[in-house]
Amino acid sequence: MTECNQEVFSFASHFSRRVEASFTAGQVSTDGGALLLRQADRKIGLLKRVASCFTDRRSPLLVEHQLGEMLSQRIYGLALGYEDLNDHEQLRHDPLMAVLSGRRKLEEPLAGKSTLNRLELPGGSKRYHKIDYEPEKLDALLCDLFIESRTEEPAQIVLDLDATDIPLHGHQPERFFHGYYDSYCYLPLYIFAGDQLLCALLRPANIDGAAGALDEVKRIVAQLRTKWPTVRIVLRGDSGFCREELMAWCEAAENQVDFLFGLARNSRLQKVVGKQMQEAKLEHAATGKAARVFTEFDYQTHKSWARARRVVAKAEYLDKGENPRFVVTSITPDKWAARELYEQFYCQRGEMENRIKEQMCLFAYRLSTEEMKGNQLRLYLSALAYTLVEALRRLALKGTEWAEAQVDTIRLKLFKIGALVRISARRVWLELNSTYPWKQIYARAFDALRC
């Protein structure tokens, strides 16, 4: 039974001692590890440049919360696990969040939910029109951060393209029912280079999965080639991106971009690999294990393709029966043999699906505003929060047990550290939990991020 007497909570215990608790510890934060995020940001210069992608039409004399502070507050909040604007009604009084956001007067609260809501209803809104953003600048910033992360020109850059569904539970604009996902949803396009995010484009669900991909690829390739004119670039995606306009653009002499796309199977393709499938079936019967036989051939669709292209086929036989798979590519056999092309190169795109899951860990699915532009901004904010955490993982956690950990694991184990916050005239002092079990990783990460 719990007793409450003058804000002291007393609990019965199985031991001889009673357990008592009271809200008398002073300023305590649960996010002591967030200082590492701040150090990562100082390394890559993300947040100081995000504000330049926005237009602030508010009267400077009447502004209480600076644009940069609000953006930092929102992005750090997403990285730390606070998905709703309502959370900031409490977070605005957290001195550690004020430090992260760059607030000079720590004794004054940060922006509340209503102020942040006006930030996320940009430009075109009838009610809120003081703050707007430029998608082109945010897109360019994501690509610039990738370029700046390389000290030398890479030999090859693989751009992974994929679309995912974000279910909608309200009456958001341009909501459509998607038969494959069996829900009303949006269908955003993501483009990654390794673990780094280069594009997060919000789209309605009543379009082809590759819609808009060519324009984004053109933009990214142009930006990359400005820095590295001769770098080899490969596009990689599933069969949803196997489109003539995308492949033809890659093959154009002035572009010099390779591609590797999945190819949807059909009766014609399955007939071509009939001999190899029979071989795989016989091997499976003899060994009782999954059997794979690879082959390749030139292939051209009857209507949609302008030319024949190299297709690599995997004739696979499993316990459940035939499982053929096909990919189409501009990469020549002397660079990648059929089996290695499929198993070692194409199958690596599965890692991108893990990166998309991390966007959901950063609440990219919270797209509930009344305007597409506002929902696109929320998608950008989640993308920027991911970029910040990815920079921390890449720069500070390499060689540790969390070098490949996902965002939610890093958040739980590295950011959620109890900290007693003491503020004086000259410094902010954090006393971190002395029983924190991963002190060595924290110290190593902090040393790696020293500017």
Image (tube, rainbow, N blue to C red):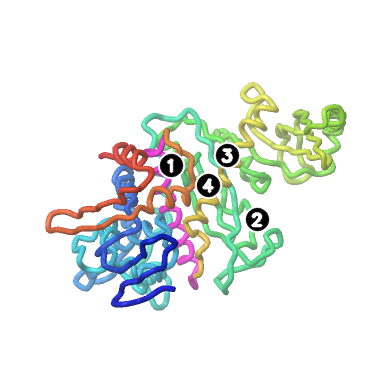
Q: Which residue is mark 1?
A: 223
Say which residue appears at 66% left-offset and 32% top-offset: 343
Say which residue appears at 53% left-offset and 61% top-offset: 365
Q: Does the magenta portion include 374?
A: yes
Q: CA distance from mark 4 to mark 1?
A: 22 Å
Q: Amino acid at mark 4?
A: Arg
Q: Does the magenta portion include 379?
A: yes
| Residue situated in front as seen by the camera: 114 or 220 | 114
> Which badge, 3 or 1, comes first in the chain's sequence?
1
- Secondary structure found at label 2: loop
Say which residue appears at 43% left-offset and 67% top-offset: 84
- Secondary structure found at label 3: strand
**Marks 1 & 2, CB-CB < 8 Å contact:** no
Which numbered disc covers residue 235? 3
Residue segment shown in magenta: 369-398
At which x and y percent is residue 370? 49, 73
Q: Which residue is mark 4?
A: 355
At which x and y percent is residue 300? 76, 38
Q: Is residue 15 visible?
A: yes
